[in-house]
């Protein structure tokens, strides 16, 4: 489920007569490498946005209060802890708006946190069976995302060092101290793939997610000993 891909491109230049020139001199021999590491993980934090909507037309069955009770009962019925259900905006009130010829409507949005694709499938089926039609995946994350980012960063910079080492060994040289280390712009933040909900609620088809892709790249300039 997890894949680590390391790709490195390189460019280096050196001066044949510069072995004893100080490291801060422009004539110092050096090698430049790019180290890139990538890892894919299955999300284990999945947020489902649920919207309840009522029409004040005299039918108590359609009030948000009744629908919320129905929603909570349905979620409990499939083993969902209601502690994971919250208002999308804890400080918000029910939003009222007018629609011509249809009276006043009220809406309330909730966020439900689950951990697996199977839980998502069960939630969407429960919502469908209880005539709650406005729901979608709003976001995904991973409980170990910080540790994973650190792991990929380390892999990327190690890849750069490894590449510099074996390239220089091929010509009888060794890398010295790093002169410059730069995390490449645009790659500092993990690249999260889009979420795909492919389940057909009426046929109980499965649910699938694209993996979260975490990718970092470093430019490193080493002096040559």
Image: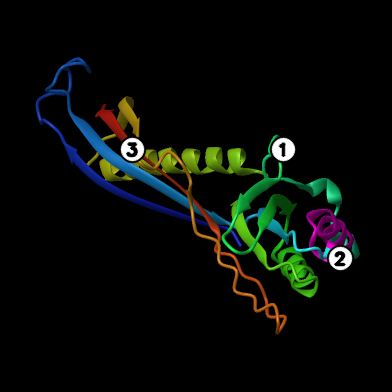
In this picture the colour scheme is rainbow
Q: Which mark is residue 108?
A: none
In the picture, measured across the screen, residue 1 lies left or right of residue 185, that is right
* Closer-to-camera residue (224/208): 208
What is the spatial separation of the Cα atoms under label 3 and label 2, in whole angstroms? 44 Å
In the picture, measured across the screen, residue 28 lies left or right of residue 107, that is left
Could you tell me if the residues under marks 3 and 1 are in contact, i.e. CB atoms within 8 Å? Answer: no
Q: Residue at x 25, y 29 (%)?
A: 224
* Secondary structure found at label 3: loop
Q: Residue at x 67, y 55 (%)?
A: 104
* Secondary structure found at label 1: loop
Q: Is residue 64 magenta-colored?
A: yes
Residue extent of the magenta highlight: 60-73
Q: Residues within 10 Å of mark 3 (few under 14, many from 20)?
A: few
Q: Residue 141: in sight, yes or no?
A: no
Residue 49 x %, y %: 66, 55
Q: Residue at x 85, y 58 (%)?
A: 66
Q: Residue 101: in sight, yes or no?
A: yes
Q: Which mark is residue 78?
A: 2
* Closer-to-camera residue (11/136): 136
Q: Is residue 135 magenta-colored?
A: no
* 208 lies above or below 106: below
Residue 221 x %, y %: 27, 31
Residue 78: image quadrant is: bottom right
Residue at which label 3 appears: 185
């Amino acid at each position: 489920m997890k894949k680590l891909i390391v790709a490195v491109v390189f460019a280096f230049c050196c001066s044949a007569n510069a072995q004893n020139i100080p490291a801060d001199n422009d004539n110092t021999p050096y090698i430049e490498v790019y180290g890139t590491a990538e890892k894919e993980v299955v999300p284990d934090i999945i947020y489902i946005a649920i919207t309840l909507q009522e029409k004040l037309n005299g039918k108590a069955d359609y009030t948000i209060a009744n629908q919320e009770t129905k929603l909570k009962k349905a979620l409990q019925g499939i083993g969902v802890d209601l502690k994971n259900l919250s208002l999308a905006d804890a400080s918000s009130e029910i939003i009222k708006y007018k629609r011509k010829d249809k009276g006043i409507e009220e809406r309330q949005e909730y966020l439900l946190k689950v951990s697996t694709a199977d839980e998502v499938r069960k939630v969407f089926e429960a919502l469908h069976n209880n005539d709650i039609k406005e729901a979608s995946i709003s976001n995904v994350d991973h409980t170990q995302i910080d540790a994973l980012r650190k792991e990929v960063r380390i892999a990327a910079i190690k890849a750069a060092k490894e590449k510099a080492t074996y390239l220089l060994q091929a010509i009888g040289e060794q890398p010295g101290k790093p002169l410059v280390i730069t995390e490449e712009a645009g790659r500092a933040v993990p690249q999260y793939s889009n979420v795909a909900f492919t389940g057909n609620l009426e046929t109980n088809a499965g649910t699938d997610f694209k993996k979260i892709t975490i990718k970092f790249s470093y430019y490193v300039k080493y002096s040559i000993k």
